[in-house]
Amino acid sequence: MQAVPTAMPISDLRKYQKKVLAQIQTSPVILTNKGQGAGVLVSVEQWNAISSQLLEAQQIKRNLAAEKAFARMAAGDYVEMTPDQIMALGQ
């Protein structure tokens, strides 16, 4: 889904519902309210792909934080941490 998103007033959503549902299969639709961005509609498939990529990126971040912590420990740099502090490393 690499097409340039279409923008439309949120008030047009009901009027052009079928057109919008067809459009989100190929590109996101940006909804506007009084000329300002109000939301983005994407297909379920695109949402799932974005969610999956985000989860993967978060896991990579946690893994990198753990690797850094293990490298510090291997170098003899020990730090006392609570479980909450450890969990916060990956956030």
Image: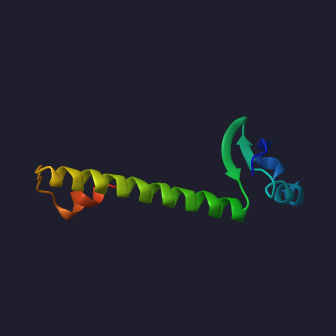
Residue at the image position 79 percent from the left and 48 percent from the top: 11
Determine whether, in the image, residue 11 is placed left or right of residue 68. Answer: right
Instruction: Decide: is 45 above or below 68.
Output: below
Report x, y in % for residue 52: 57, 62
Check the image and tell me how it is coloured.
Answer: rainbow
Residue 34 found in image quarter = top right
- Which residue of the protein is positioned furthest toward the top in this rendering? 35
- Which residue of the protein is positioned furthest toward the front in this rendering? 75
Instruction: Decide: is 2 above or below 60.
Output: above
Residue at the image position 80 percent from the left and 43 percent from the top: 8
Q: How many marks?
A: 0
Determine whether, in the image, residue 50 is placed left or right of residue 87. Answer: right
Q: Nearer the viewer, residue 65 or 32?
A: 65
Determine whether, in the image, residue 49 is placed left or right of residue 71. Answer: right
Instruction: Decide: is 36 above or below 30.
Output: above
Observer able to see residue 91: no
Observer able to see residue 11: yes
Report x, y in % for residue 17: 85, 58
Report x, y in % for residue 83: 20, 64
Report x, y in % for residue 71: 22, 52
Determine whether, in the image, residue 73 is placed left or right of residue 13. Answer: left
